[in-house]
Amino acid sequence: NAGVTQTPKFQVLKTGQSMTLQCAQDMNHNSMYWYRQDPGMGLRLIYYSASEGTTDKGEVPNGYNVSRLNKREFSLRLESAAPSQTSVYFCASSEITARNSPLHFGNGTRLTVT
Amino acid sequence: AQSVTQPDIHITVSEGASLELRCNYSYGATPYLFWYVQSPGQGLQLLLKYFSGDTLVQGIKGFEAEFKRSQSSFNLRKPSVHWSDAAEYFCAVAPLGQGGKLIFGQGTELSVKP
């Protein structure tokens, strides 16, 4: 039972380069999320998708785009990477977008932008 | 604005000793509260959750948490810590009307001395 799978695990980019972080879940969940984790700041929501075909901004969406490719997959794209985007990125999913539907997290992608 | 505060950035306890990690929230309505644990290099795993009812909730790995509305707190406890409990712990609140989005505290890193 894989749960939430993120690729790649590690990535180093130069300023201005682009990349896409991939996320897939096999739990038949409707809702998916992208968070970033920075030291001393906990996790902050970048974008989320309540259901297939919908996406919405979270707390820190600037510099990112997302695509809900299908029910299983939710990708995060950095069009022009900046050093401020150096972070650990977590994808999560939940059965529905409701307060009582706990999030299930992937193992994260550690991104360094030089 | 809703917020979650974990006052202790880093705590060190001896193996076998008891543990209490503090969490304070700022939220007007009835909070939905969570504790997650992040082992090194891993994603976040749900330890326990509180929605309503009994204010003492039991979780996995021998953890429990107590909701105290008068103190706006949701502290995590364990009677006897094991070396494998060394990890980072996050408290989070799910605000009303914002679906499954979570607001996280800054995290508390737990070290366990032999």
Image (cartoon, helix red, strand yellow):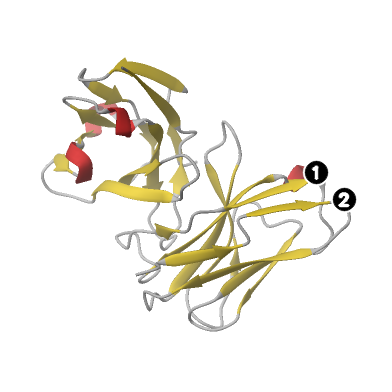
The residue lying toward the viewer, choosing from A45 and B47, is B47
Residue bearing mark 2: A15
| Chain ID at mark 2 | A
In terms of sequence position, does the residue under pointer 1 or pointer 2 come before the other?
2
Instruction: Name the residue beneath numbered marker 1.
Output: A83
| Badge 1 vs badge 2, beta-carbon distance below 8 Å | yes
Residue A111 in percent (x, y) is at 69, 50
- Report in which chain the residue with disc 1 lies: A
Determine which quarter of the picture holds residue B113: top left
| Residue at left offset 12%, top offset 48% | B53
Relative to B17, B21 lies left or right: right
Badge 1 crowding class, 10 Å Cα cut-off, few under 14, some 14 to 19, many 20 or more, is: some
Which residue is outermost to the left? Answer: B54
Residue A84 horizontal/vertical position (percent): 76, 43
- Residue A73: x and y in percent read 54, 76
Residue positioned 16% across, 42% down in the render: B57
Q: In percent of the image, x 33 and y 26: which residue is there?
A: B22
Q: Secondary structure at mark 2?
A: loop
Question: Hey, which residue is sitting farthest front in the picture?
Answer: B114
Q: CA distance from mark 1 to mark 2?
A: 7 Å
